[in-house]
Image (cartoon, helix red, strand yellow):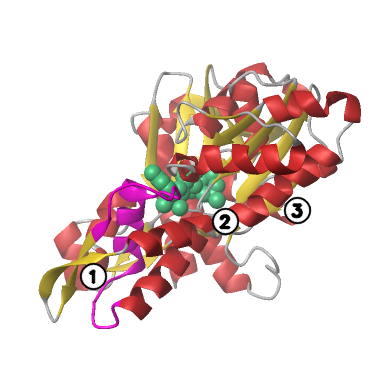
Amino acid sequence: MTKQKVLNIGIDLGTSRSVIACDNGVRTFIPSYVGFPKDTVSRKFFGKDILFGDEALKNKPALELHRPFDKGVLKFSDDPEKTVKDYKFTVNCAKQLLTHLVSLATNGEPGEYSLRGVVGTPALASRKNKQTMMDICEGVLDYVLVASEPFCVAYGLNLLGSALIIDIGAGTVDMCRMHGTVPAEDDQITLTKGGDHIDGIFFDLVKSKYPEANFTTNMLKKFKEENATITGKGEELFITLPINGKPTELNVTEEIKAACRTIVPDLVEGIGKLISTYDPEFQDDLKQNVILAGGGSQMIGLRKEIEDHMRKHLGYGRVSRVEEPVYAGANGALLLCRDMPEEYWTELRPAATATQKVAAMAAVKG
Ligand SMILES: Nc1ncnc2c1ncn2[C@@H]1O[C@H](COP(=O)(O)OP(=O)(O)OP(=O)(O)O)[C@@H](O)[C@H]1O
Ligand SMILES: [Mg+2]
């Protein structure tokens, strides 16, 4: 490595949140949104050409807002040859997001460091998606290594023996069976019903119960993050939404529970599959050690629901939740950064200067 100071960065570019954890103690996350001012007036108002995360969300009406990831992978990455312009634009949105996170980590001086990043991807990201991650990191990092997200979580918790990691994100639920080696393809399952799916169902249920109410998916998502539960008992849950402009309290107790429950059947089926196809001598060890991570793991009652299901169908199950659902993936990616020998890293083209990056972005935007 040519530059003197090496900065290791654990990176979790998520559908909903992008998170970094770095060697120098910087840990932070932002919602995965990139916004461009809609016109000359808004550009003058913001005094800049690009906004990120919460700042972008708060100024939505004046921005062209983009969320580059969907279902855990970059949009348009399934068939980049067919959608060249959209793909390139979305790669650049993600690149800008990563550049922003890296500048937070390096205090705006990324050129001082040799930047090494381990980037988490959904468990079963295809070869193409791994290449997409490389495309995103090109020009931002100097060295990169792509690893599966639940593997990063397991590595960060030092759960390398028998354990079943379930990372419940916005776009995907990633499941991975650990058994002391790097997990193979048949150790992993990726489901595409995650938090975004819950938000969509919740939206439809509230719309059909209160057709006169005005709301966006984002408003419901915020409510979900404060109230998500799947337990049968508990208090009634009310959301305040405008009806003809007047804030009105609406009972959504059944709707939020029903929406949250929709991810459970596939999830428990996945657990059954990963356990029943494992070496029978060690199945009990896996059942003992089911670990929930990701934002969705915070749903009240989920842990018990999975344990009840496992008891009924698999005889036994012990489920726990990671302490830091937001940072678990990035923390593990950072540990991998520190531990992986040089031969595992891919060297990228040297990081571009900030001016080159802005010029590239402008060219793609047209
Ligand atoms: N308390 C909560 N209860 C239920 N869901 C929550 C809670 N907090 C956050 N979420 C949901 O968790 C999801 C975000 O989790 P996370 O940050 O792990 O996802 P991500 O990494 O962005 O997505 P992916 O891994 O699929 O790319 C969102 O759908 C969010 O609404
Ligand atoms: Mg994630």
Residue in view at x 64 percent, y 27 percent: 154
Q: Is residue 1 among the parts visible in the rendering?
A: no
Picture quarter with ligand 2: top right
Up-down relation of residue 121 to residue 329 (above or below): below
Q: Residue at label 1?
A: 61
Q: Amino acid at mark 2?
A: Ile
Residue 263 image label: 2
Mark 2 and mark 1 lie on one chain; the one further toward the N terminus is 1
* Span of residues in magenta: 210-238
Residue 299, by quadrant, is: top left
Residue in view at x 61 percent, y 49 percent: 173
Q: Quadrant of the N terminus?
A: top right
Up-down relation of residue 193 to residue 279 (above or below): below
Question: Do callouts 3 and 2 mark residues in contact (Cβ within 8 Å)?
Answer: no
Residue 246, by quadrant, is: bottom left
How many discs appear? Answer: 3
